[in-house]
Image: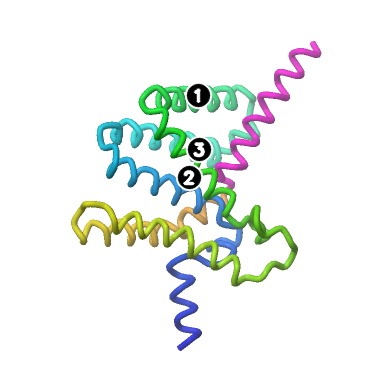
Amino acid sequence: MKRAFSIIHRAIVGPEYGFSGEGNIQWYYSLSVAINLMLIWWLKPEIAVLFTTLVIIHGFTVFTYGFFELDYCNSIWAYIYAIIHFIILANAIFTNFKWTIITIAITIGAMLLAPDCTGNNIFLEKPNVDNRLLLLCNTIIFAVFVVVDLLLPISGWIKIIIISVAIIAHPIIDWLEGECIIISDITYDVIYKIMDDLASRKNH
């Protein structure tokens, strides 16, 4: 019985190191974005369409940059990525500064909680960390997502669909992380490429 519960638990909140064994960073990030959008549609519906559109554009550029391995290509792609995201951020800030800050705060909080492929996050930095703590982190982030979903003023069957879609999408997102579609790695690469390019131009 205990083993069956453990299997079901991991199937719902995700294994300690993700379904692909590459960590949970992209999953936590995706959940935080979903939580933000649900809160905005609930509490600030007048900006929801714009913020949703910005998230879709953001997700498309992240997927494109990571899936097509543009980090190995000319630095021009890093500039294009940075410009697109500067425009996204500017639009969000000018539309609603408070909700932009809330969105960034929730996302950063989720990223700090997310265990990487070594099982470490900002709170768990020792090697061979207890897997129960990793599973606890997975449970916390998913529980927050479920609570926000259940509080939405929408039909119960829609709430169930949202949760079901998240559970089904989890292994897909983890697989994409295994294909190097990871927001943190892509962001670091873009910053590094631009700084390296600017330094080389300065030296010349």
Amino acid type, residue under disc 1 in the picture: Phe
Q: Position of residue 187 (x, y in %)?
A: 60, 36
Residue 200 location (% of width, % of height):
76, 18
Q: 121 or 188: which is nearer to us? A: 121
Mark on residue 86?
1
Callout 3 secondary element: helix
Quadrant of the drawing holding the C terminus: top right
Would you say residue 18 sits in the magenta stretch? no
Quick one: label 3 or label 1, which is nearer the N terminus?
3
Q: Is residue 101 left or right of residue 112?
A: left
Q: Quadrant of residue 169?
A: bottom left
Asked whether 4 or 95 is in front, the reply is: 95
The main secondary structure of the magenta stretch is helix
Asked if residue 32 is positioned above or below residue 144 in the image, the reply reads above
Q: Give the label on residue 180, or none.
A: none
| Residue type marked 2 | Ile
Task: Report the residue marked by disc 2.
Answer: 106
